[in-house]
C-alpha cells in the first residue's frame, strides 16, 4: 500500500490524474450524471441515483410531512459535499493531512413569493449562498486559503450554480399501463 | 474587620487567569497525547506561580491558582473522573434529538461542531483523583494567603454531563447522575476544607440560561444546550438549589459561595445574556451558601436594587470590574458600586472581585494579563479607600 493521507492513497490519486491527463477520453464517462425522481404523494419524492436512493420532502410549514430535507436544502448539501471532496482532493495532492473539516452553508432565496405565484418580482432561486469552511490541518493559513480558493474555482456543483446551468425542460405524457 | 480574620472588603478573584502561550502549547500537546499528564502538571506549576505572583503584586487577598491546570472551569473533570468522556458536538450530533437546535447554536457561535467539546457521562462516574486537591496543595506550599478554590457546581456538572442516548444506559435520569455528582462534590469540599482551603466557590453560570430563556440565536452556554433545553425553568431552578444544598448541607469550617454570571466566552457584550437577578433571587436565597459571587460591573447584570427585597441575607462577592473590557475601571467607579451595595449589605458582608474570570476558557481568554493586573490593582486601591472610610 502507498502513502495514505486523509484516508486516500496519494499514489493512486496521482495515477488517476496522470491517466486522465494522458487519455482525456477515459474521463468522458465522468461527464454525465443521471438521477430519477418519483413522486410519492404530497410533496414527497424519492430520488434514485445509480444504486442509491433518498427521500425529498418539504417541512411541515410548507405543507410537507418533514420526513426529509427539501430540494433546495439538498442543493446546499450537494454544494457542501462537493466542496468537501474538492478540499480534501486539493489538500491531499499537496500532502497536507486534515484533522477536521466542516462546512456551514446558508442560502438566501431571492423571492419565495414567485414560487407561490404571489409575485412577479425577482426569482425563486438562491440569490446568494454563503459557504464557510472550518479547517483544522497542519498547514499555514495562506496555504489553506489557496486550497479553498482552488476548491471553489474547480467545484462542479459550485460552477453549476455560479454559471447558471442551461436547463432543457422536456415533458412526456405517459399513462401507467 | 470582616469575618475570619479578613480585612473589610477583601479583594479576591473569581478564578481564572489568562494562560501564557507556552502553557497553551503544552495543553495542546497533552490533548494530542504528546506529553503526559505529569509532564503537563510540571509546566503548569510554573504558570500557577506566575498567576499567583501577579495576584499578590496586584493586591489580591484571597488568591486562586488562576485555573492554570484546567482547560476551562468544568471540562477539567474529565481528567479526574472515570466514566466521563470528552466529546465534541460533532460526535454527539447523532444522539441529539433536536439537531436543528444544535445547528442554530453553532451558527450563532460561528464555530464548527468539531471544535466544541464537553464532558459526557458514558459510564458510572467515580473519582480517579481528587478534583482540585492538587491545586490547593500546590498553592499552600507557595503562599500563606487565604485560597479560593472554584469548583463546577452540581447543577452545571449534571446538566452538562447527562446526554440522552449516551448517559442513560447507566443513569436512566439526570437525577440518577446527580446523586453521584453530589456525593463527589461533597467529598471534595470536605477534603479541600481539611487541607486548608478558605473559600470554595461553586460555579453555576448556566442558571442565567435557565431564567432568561434566550431565543436560540443568542444561546450563551453550549454546555447547557446539549441537554434538557426544554425543561421547565422553575423546576430547574428549584432542582439546582436542592443539588447545591445536598452538596453543602452541614459542611462547616470553610466559606462556600456560589457564582453566577451571564457568559464569559467572548468580549462581544451583545452576544452574552442580559437581565437582572430578580428571577434568580428566590433560588439564591434557597441555596444554603455563605456568599453569592455575582457580576455587577457589566450593565447587563442590572441594578443592585434587586436586593431591596432580601437585605443582608448573605455575603456578596461583588463584581466590580468587567473582565472583558480593555478599559480599566477607576477606583471611583468601584467605590460607587460598593456604596450602592452598602444600601443592602453590611460592610463586613461585601467582598470585591471581578465579574468573572479573566480566562475562563484556556484558548479564549477575555483579557490580557496586563489589563487583568491593572483591574485587580484598581480593586485593591478602592478597597483601601473604603477601609479608611468604613472603619479600618
Image (cartoon, rainbow, N blue to C red):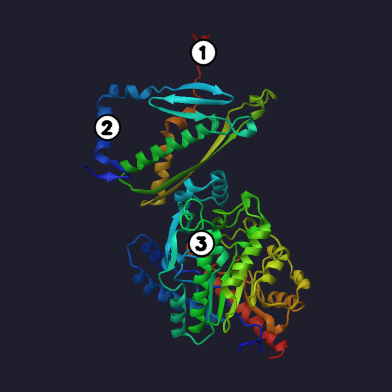
What secondary structure is marked by label 3? loop
Chain under numbered label 3 = B
Quarter residue B198 falls in? bottom right
Residue B339 locus on image (x, y percent): 74, 78
- Give A133 or B68, whichever is nearer the viewer: B68
Residue at 39% from the left image edge and 52% from the top image edge: A140
Q: Pinpoint residue A53: horizontal percent, then vertical percent.
A: 44, 28
Do marks 1 and 2 both belong to one polypeptide chain? yes
Disc 3 vs disc 1: which is toward the camera? 1
Residue B73 at least partly seen: no
Left or right, B198 with reference to A118 = left
The residue carrying mark 1 is A170
Q: Chain of mark 1?
A: A
Residue B129 is situated, as x and y percent measured from the top left of the image, at 41, 72
In this rendering, the answer to whether A74 lies above or below B180 is above
- The CA distance from mark 3 to mark 1 is 56 Å
In this rendering, which labeled residue sits more in front, label 1 or label 2?
1
According to the picture, the residue beneath numbered tag 2 turns out to be A16
| Mark 1, other Cα within 10 Å: few <14 / some 14–19 / many ≥20 | few
Quarter of the figure with residue A48:
top left
Chain assignment, label 2: A
Residue, disc 3: B364
Q: Nearer the viewer, residue B219 or A68?
A: A68
Residues under numbered marks 3 and 2 in contact, where contact means CB atoms less than 8 Å apart: no
Question: Quick check: can you spot residue B286?
Answer: yes
Amino acid at each position: 500500500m502507498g502513502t495514505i493521507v486523509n484516508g486516500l492513497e496519494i499514489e493512486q490519486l496521482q495515477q488517476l490524474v496522470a491517466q486522465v491527463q494522458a487519455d482525456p477520453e477515459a474521463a468522458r464517462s465522468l461527464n454525465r450524471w443521471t438521477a430519477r425522481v418519483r413522486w410519492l404523494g404530497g410533496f414527497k419524492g424519492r430520488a434514485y441515483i445509480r444504486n442509491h436512493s433518498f427521500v425529498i420532502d418539504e417541512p411541515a410549514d410548507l405543507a410537507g410531512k418533514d420526513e426529509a430535507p427539501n430540494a433546495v436544502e439538498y442543493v446546499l448539501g450537494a454544494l457542501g459535499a462537493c466542496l468537501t471532496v474538492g478540499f480534501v482532493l486539493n489538500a491531499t495532492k499537496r500532502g497536507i493531512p486534515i484533522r477536521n473539516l466542516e462546512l456551514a452553508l446558508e442560502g438566501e432565496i431571492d423571492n419565495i413569493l414567485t414560487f407561490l405565484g404571489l409575485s412577479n418580482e425577482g426569482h425563486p432561486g438562491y440569490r446568494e449562498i454563503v459557504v464557510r469552511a472550518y479547517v483544522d490541518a497542519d498547514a499555514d493559513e495562506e496555504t489553506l486559503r489557496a486550497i479553498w480558493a482552488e476548491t471553489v474555482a474547480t467545484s462542479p456543483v459550485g460552477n453549476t450554480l455560479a454559471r447558471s446551468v442551461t436547463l432543457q425542460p422536456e415533458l412526456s405524457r405517459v399513462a401507467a399501463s | 474587620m470582616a469575618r475570619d480574620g479578613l480585612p473589610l472588603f477583601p479583594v479576591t478573584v473569581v478564578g481564572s487567569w489568562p494562560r501564557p502561550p507556552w502553557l497553551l502549547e503544552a495543553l495542546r500537546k497533552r490533548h494530542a497525547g504528546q506529553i503526559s499528564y505529569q509532564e503537563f502538571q510540571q509546566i503548569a506549576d510554573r504558570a500557577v506561580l506566575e498567576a499567583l505572583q501577579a495576584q499578590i503584586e496586584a493586591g489580591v487577598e484571597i488568591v486562586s491558582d488562576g485555573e492554570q491546570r484546567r482547560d476551562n472551569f468544568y471540562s477539567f473533570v474529565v481528567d479526574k473522573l472515570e466514566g466521563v468522556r470528552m466529546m465534541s458536538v460533532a460526535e454527539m450530533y447523532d444522539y441529539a434529538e433536536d439537531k436543528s437546535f444544535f445547528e442554530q447554536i453553532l451558527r450563532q457561535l460561528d464555530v464548527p461542531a468539531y471544535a466544541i467539546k464537553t464532558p459526557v457521562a458514558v459510564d458510572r462516574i467515580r473519582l480517579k483523583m481528587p478534583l482540585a486537591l492538587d491545586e490547593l496543595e500546590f498553592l499552600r506550599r507557595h503562599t500563606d494567603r487565604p485560597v479560593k478554590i472554584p469548583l463546577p457546581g452540581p447543577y452545571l456538572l449534571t446538566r452538562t454531563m447527562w446526554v440522552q442516548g449516551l448517559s442513560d444506559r447507566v443513569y436512566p435520569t439526570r437525577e440518577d447522575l446527580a446523586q453521584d455528582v453530589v456525593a463527589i462534590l461533597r467529598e471534595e469540599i470536605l477534603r479541600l476544607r481539611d487541607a486548608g482551603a478558605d473559600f470554595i466557590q461553586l460555579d453555576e453560570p448556566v442558571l442565567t440560561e435557565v431564567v432568561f430563556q434566550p431565543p436560540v440565536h443568542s444561546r450563551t452556554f453550549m454546555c447547557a444546550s446539549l441537554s434538557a433545553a426544554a425543561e421547565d425553568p422553575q423546576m430547574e431552578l428549584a432542582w439546582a438549589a436542592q443539588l447545591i444544598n445536598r452538596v453543602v448541607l452541614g459542611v462547616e469550617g470553610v466559606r462556600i459561595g456560589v457564582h453566577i454570571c451571564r457568559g464569559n466566552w467572548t468580549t462581544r457584550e451583545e452576544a452574552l445574556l442580559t437581565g437582572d437577578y430578580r428571577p434568580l433571587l428566590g433560588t439564591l436565597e434557597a441555596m444554603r451558601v455563605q456568599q453569592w459571587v455575582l457580576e455587577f460591573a457589566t450593565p447587563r447584570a442590572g441594578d443592585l436594587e434587586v436586593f431591596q427585597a432580601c437585605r443582608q441575607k448573605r455575603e456578596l462577592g461583588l463584581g466590580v470590574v468587567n473582565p472583558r473590557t480593555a478599559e480599566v475601571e477607576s477606583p471611583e467607579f468601584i467605590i460607587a458600586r460598593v456604596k450602592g451595595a452598602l444600601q443592602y449589605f453590611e460592610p463586613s458582608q461585601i467582598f470585591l472581585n471581578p465579574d468573572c474570570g479573566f480566562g475562563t476558557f484556556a484558548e479564549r481568554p477575555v483579557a490580557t494579563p496586563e489589563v487583568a493586573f491593572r483591574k485587580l490593582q484598581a480593586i485593591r486601591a478602592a478597597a483601601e479607600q473604603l477601609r479608611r472610610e468604613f472603619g479600618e
